[in-house]
Image: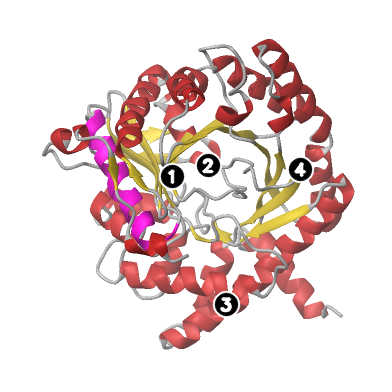
Amino acid sequence: MISRREIFETLDMIDQQHLDIRTVTMGISLLDCADPDPEACCRKIYDKITRLAKDLVRTGEDIEREFGIPIVNKRISVTPISLAAAASETEDYVLFARTLERAAAETGVNFIGGFSALVHKGFTAADRKLVASIPRALAETERVCSSVNVASTKSGINMDAVALMGRTIKETARLTADRGSLGCAKLVAFCNAVEDNPFMAGAFHGVGEPESVINVGISGPGVVHHALLECKGAPFDLVAETIKRTAFRVTRMGQLVAREASSRLGVPFGVVDLSLAPTPAIGDSVADILEEMGLERVGTHGTTAALALLNDAVKKGGLMAASHVGGLSGAFIPVSEDAGMIASAEAGTLCLDKLEAMTCVCSVGLDMIAVPGDTPAETLSAILADEAAIGMVNNKTTAVRLIPAEGKVVGDRVDFGGLLGSAPVIGVHPESSEVFVARGGRIPAPMQSLRN
């Protein structure tokens, strides 16, 4: 039986502490949509998505209204298009992106992910066509998100893919320059990409997933920050326990929403992603949590240790509250989407090198970071390689979402609006990585790849 006190505490978490369900994401397999005729393939893709997801948004809104739990985004993820479209006889995959856009508009979802390719060990012909289409696809659509997996612990780092992604990011920035290079905010390069991630821009529906599935991503950094106000000066053992208890309560809400959406839509429940996903709103910041632990400002010495504690405690607490946990799970540190991170970057405390160190212990990687528009493609590729190396060696998912903002220099700000927020432009090292990136080939996998 839920006590009256617990009910009031939950209401306060929603009303005052920015607690929400960040996303309910329906994953849909498109493997049966393959067709040599690209137009026929597109029709199959559109028909299947709109048939399975026709009630997704309405169901999410009903749950919000009945339970009083905010659900910020309703989203769709699909089989990587490089797989679904591989049989189609066409060189231009932009038509598949347009199809995804039409299906997203028809169903009313905020985003649709899966304009993706998995190239960690090499390229198929379809992979090359998809990556070549990414800049135009993201420039000509609003809701389509793209991702490319360039490395894994088992296979190493595909440096040819890394080099290509640097150029792809630059071209995407150029084609969306009139919107602050917004296309790059919808493009992720991964190491060890997971098949059940409900968060954009990296969501896709993996080949090991069922025909369709409901995955839920939770949030709640404001709730964790509020809980830590009660243990000022306490030892870290108590801090960790407080975060674990809070994460348990937040995750139980995510489990409730996931089960309810699954039941109403007649779609299997997949996972709850135990992530602290911030927003630009004041009071909804992962940086605030770290500073509440005693850091004067995020980015100073001790930040990586504080983030490691937070990430671990969130996972330990949430794991006990959900029947199936997956996705990315932990603490996100997107610079443009976190008011505290933005403030630290503008103050010069949080730099690219420190952010890279923080990604060794958190959920994802270098996320929503604006860099000068004249940053060379090879420098972008080298940053991707560094982050992929962290994921590969530590057997964890890492990702990079860089925005080389056209016409912007260090100290400028790029505004994206909504959950994407705004990002101060951060400097990169001026020394060239061109010769390093030009070597190509594959950086071999580490020894733990042989643990089988």
Residue 212 - label:
4
Q: Quadrant of residue 226?
A: bottom right
Q: CA distance from mark 1 to mark 4?
A: 23 Å
The numbered disc on residue 244 is 3
| Secondary structure under the numbered disc 4 in the rendered image | strand
Q: Are marks 4 and 2 in contact (CB under 8 Å)?
A: no
Check residue 202 in the rendering and tell me which mark sits there, or answer none. Answer: 2
Question: At label 3, which amino acid type do we have?
Answer: Lys
Task: Looking at the picture, tell me which residue is in the foreground, 307 or 419.
Answer: 307
Secondary element type, mark 3? helix
Question: Mark 3 or mark 1, which is nearer the start of the sequence?
Answer: 1
What secondary structure is found at the residue carrying circle 1? strand
- Image position of 256 with respect to 264: above or below: below
Which stretch appears magenta? 377-396
- Element marked by disc 2: loop
Quarter of the view holding residue 15: bottom right
Q: Give how far across and how far down residue 230 sits, in percent.
A: 53, 81
User: Taking 392 as reference, is 428 left or right?
Assistant: left
| Residue under the point 86% across and 45% down | 265
Numbered badge on residue 190: 1
Camera sees residue 124: yes
Which comes sooner in the sequence, label 4 or label 2?
2
User: Disc 4 vs disc 3: Cβ atoms closer than 8 Å?
Assistant: no
* Distance CA(mark 4)–CA(mark 2): 18 Å
Kind of residue indicated by mark 2: Gly
Q: Quadrant of residue 32?
A: top right
- Pick the residue in front: 118 or 67: 118
